[in-house]
Amino acid sequence: MDRRFIRILAMLIITLAYQFIITSSFAQAPQKMSYQAVIRNTAGALVQSSPISMRVSILQGSITGTEVYKEIYNPNPQTNANGLVTIEIGGGIPVTGTFSGINWSNGPYFIKIETDPAGGTNYSITNTSQLLSVPYALHSKTADSLSGASNTFKHYIGELYGGGIVVGVWKEAGVEKGLITSLTDISIGAAWSNIATTDIGLTAQSLYEGQTNTNAIIAQVGHYASAAKICNDYTSGGYNDWYLPSVWELRMCYNSALIVNKVLGATNGFQWNYYWSSTEYDNDDAYVLVFYNGNNIFPNKGNTHRVRAVRRF
C-alpha cells in the first residue's frame, strides 16, 4: 500500500471531524475532552450505525513518547447514520494511569487514537497527533484553582488585533497564546509553489507549524514564487511575521469562520472556497482545506487556490 493511499485513508477516517472541548467544570473531576471522528472502512465506505472499538493513549514528549494514560470503552462507541462517532476522553476504562493524574504542564502531549471499525480488538487504524490548546486549558484551570485566580483570557476570537483578526486563543503553561489571520484573502489564486514535482520532505510536512513549513518552501532550491512567499512578504498593522498556515492552523481559521465573517463581512471574510495550507503532502501535492464542507483534499502544487496569511502572538 503506497504512502499516498495510507495518508488519504488516515485523513478520511480520523481527522475530518477532529475537535476537542472541555466538557466539565473543575469541580467535576475528572475533566474530559470530547472527540469526534468520521469512521470509514478500508474500502472507504462509511461505517454507519455500528459499534466500533477505540483505544486512546496520551503520550508525553513525542509521537513515540512515554504512555502516561490509556483507556478503552465498554460498551463500544456507536457511529451514527453519517458514520460519526463521539467519545469522551477521560471517561473510558483506564488501562494505564489516570486522566486526572496527567500533569499537563509537563508537555508537549500527543494523543494516539486506535480504531477497529469491526468492533473487535484488531486496531488496524492508528492516528497520532499533538494536543495543543485543550491540555493547557486544563492545566490553567488546575493552576487557577490552586492560586485562587480566575482562568481569564485577554484576547478573544473575532477581536481585531495584531494586524488582523484573532481566530484562536489558548494557554501554554499559563501564558496566553493566539493565532491571528489576515483581514482579507491576500491572493484569490496562487500556486502552492513554482516547484510542483519535487518533494521538500519533513521540514515542510508539519501538520501544526506553518512557520516551519513556510520557511522550508521558500528555501527550496529553485523556488521563486509560492503561496508561502506571498504570506512571508505580507505586512499588516506593522507586523511582517506572517506565514502560510499549516493544515491544523487553517482548520482553526475554518472553525472560527462564522465569527470572523460576522466581524469582517462577506467580502473580507473567508470564502466558500479552497484554501492552501503550508503542509506538503508528497512530491506533487499539498493539503488544501475546502471551506464549504471542511474536508481536506490534496491537489497538485501547481494548482491555484486562495491564500490567507496567519501569525501568532
Image (spheres, helix red, strand yellow):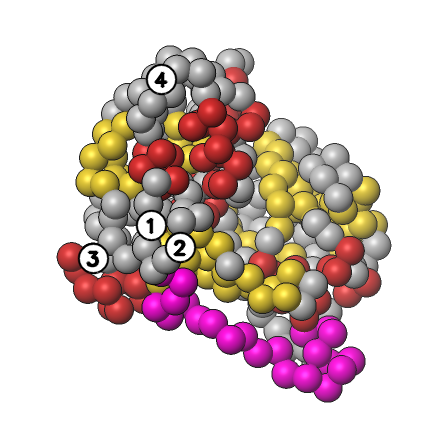
Q: Earlier in the sequence, mark 1 or mark 3?
A: 1
On screen, residue 194 versus residue 176, left or right, reads: left
Q: Earlier in the sequence, mark 2 or mark 3?
A: 2
Q: Which residue is mark 4?
A: 195
Q: Residue at x 35, y 17 (%)?
A: 195
Where disc 2 sits, the SS reads: loop
Q: Which residue is mark 2?
A: 239
Marking on residue 268:
3
Answer few, some or many: residues within 10 Å of disc 3's Cα (few below 14, many 20 plus, some between 14 and 19).
some
Q: Residue at x 58, y 66 (%)?
A: 176
Is mark 1 in CB contact (under 8 Å) with mark 2? yes
Magenta part of the chain: 141-163
Residue 82: x %, y % from top left: 38, 47
The answer to whether residue 239 is seen in the rendering is yes
Select label 2 or label 4 by which is in front: 2
Look at the picture and state if 281 lies above or below 142.
above
Answer few, some or many: residues within 10 Å of disc 4's Cα (few below 14, many 20 plus, some between 14 and 19).
many
Q: Would you identify the image quadrant in which residue 137 lies? A: bottom right
